[in-house]
Amino acid sequence: TVVRDDAVDAVRAMKSSGSGPLSTIGSLSLCRSLLRAGLVDRFRVVMFPVITGATGEERIYDGYPDVALQTIEHRTFDGRIQLVEYKPRVLEPV
């Protein structure tokens, strides 16, 4: 779905309609906005066994609030790549 207006309002409406699971891939700013709005039910992380030190350009969690993560599911593919799914809970600033 392409949303031309406020994405947070659009996702809130889609979730309340019960139209099924929603997901996003990429768009760090969208993910940050949805997390802050309390609209993220699960946080899926796929880890690849590579460290990008000198070549890494953007730290993907910059700008995120502090979040506690409860493990929901985890799998390992081909003995190296891991998928971990979490339920997030945004922590209040101290």
Image (cartoon, helix red, strand yellow):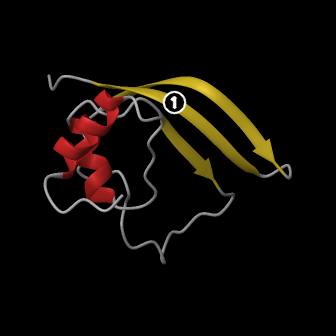
- Mark 1 surroundings: few (<14), some (14-19) or many (≥20) residues within 10 A: some
Residue with the most extreme bottom position: 55
Total numbered labels placed on residues in the image: 1
Mark 1 residue element:
strand
Q: Is residue 52 left or right of residue 35?
A: right
Q: Measured along the vertical axis of the image, is residue 13 above or below residue 59? A: above
Q: Quadrant of residue 11?
A: top left
7 vs 79, nearest the viewer: 7
67 vs 21, nearest the viewer: 21
The residue that mark 1 highlights is: 86
* Quarter that holds the C terminus: top left
36 vs 15, nearest the viewer: 15
Query: What's under tag 1, amino acid-wise?
Result: Tyr
Q: Residue shown at 35%/51% (left/top)?
A: 61
Q: Is residue 73 left or right of residue 61?
A: right
Q: Measured along the vertical axis of the image, is residue 28 above or below residue 68? A: below
Q: Residue shown at 29%/33% (left/top)?
A: 39
10 vs 41, nearest the viewer: 10
Residue 85 locus on image (x, y percent): 57, 34
* Quarter that holds the N terminus: bottom left
Q: Residue shown at 32%/31% (left/top)?
A: 17
Q: Is residue 93 left or right of residue 44?
A: left
Residue 68 locus on image (x, y percent): 38, 25
Residue 29 locus on image (x, y percent): 26, 57
Q: Residue shown at 77%/42% (left/top)?
A: 76
Q: Measured along the vertical axis of the image, is residue 36 above or below residue 59? A: above
Residue 2 locus on image (x, y percent): 31, 62
